[in-house]
Amino acid sequence: MATRIDYSPYTGRDKRKAFTESLTPESPLPSRGLTMAECRTIAKSLDDDDIEIGCIEDVIIRAIMVFSRREPFSRKKERIETLLPQLVSWMVTDTVSSSLWYAKREEDEVYGYFLSLVSRTHPMTRRLGIVALMDRDFLCPRHLDELLDTIADVRSEDYLLQMAVAWFFATAYTYHPDESLPFFARLDEVIRRRAVRKCRESRRITPKRLEALESFLERT
């Protein structure tokens, strides 16, 4: 039987609940108003990730448990597949990516799995793949060309998926500007504008690099 999480100790959260729901209008689930730190604390207290889903925190807590569990990735992958239909918001995909545990010897398998998610149909599943691949272990010279080539071809009307692609390219340009620059010309026009805006907002991209990006796009 699925575990129903007891949220009774977390009272007086109306203001934070309203704030979370304002940030996640795409979610069909309400919020309980918990912080990420509180969600992580609850996740650590549970033994089984079979959780009754009634709010966005339930999904976050389950996702944290699945991603952080120390087990072979072949088993973790099966758990992630059962989690994918519950990805109701960017708040879930972006939170759990940082919780991912895997053995170093499994890196190629993990990389291949998340790359495969980019080609699925569900926007939040695709966003999860893109966000996970922004980890420095994957966004590295060994995988860079394949990542840039694959993600540059993403086309979608979904705003949150478009923003994930824009975020990816702003991150790629931060760490690998020369290699990623040509791929900006291949981006969907809406995504390209958002990627450039993210580059402008970044404190890690120097004015010289930003000028090079804008000059390149003016010539293409």
Image (cartoon, rainbow, N blue to C red):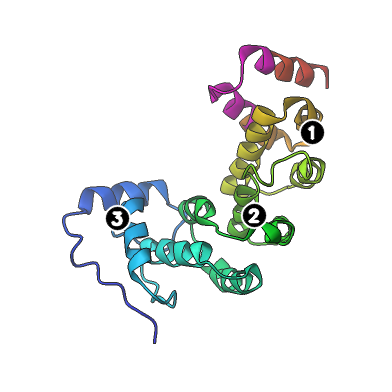
Tell me the residue at 64%/54% (across/down): 129
Tell me the residue at 44%/67% (across/down): 62
Q: How far apart are marks 1 and 2 (CA)?
A: 19 Å
Mark 2: which amino acid? Gly
Q: Give the range drawn in magenta.
A: 195-210
Residue placed under numbered mark 3 in the picture? 34
- Where does the image place residue 161, in percent across and percent down from the top left? 61, 48
Which label is found at residue 66?
Answer: none
| Label 1 or label 2, whichever comes before in sequence order | 2
Residue placed under numbered mark 1 in the picture? 183
> Residue 39 is drawn in which quadrant?
bottom left
Mark 3: which amino acid? Leu
The kind of secondary structure the magenta stretch mainly shows is helix
Which label is found at residue 129?
Answer: 2
Q: How far apart are marks 2 and 3 (CA)?
A: 25 Å
| SS state under label 3 | loop
| Label 3 or label 1, whichever comes before in sequence order | 3
Q: Are marks 3 and 1 in contact (CB under 8 Å)?
A: no
Q: Can residue 117 be seen in this view?
A: no
Q: Do the residues labelled 2 and 3 touch (CB within 8 Å)?
A: no
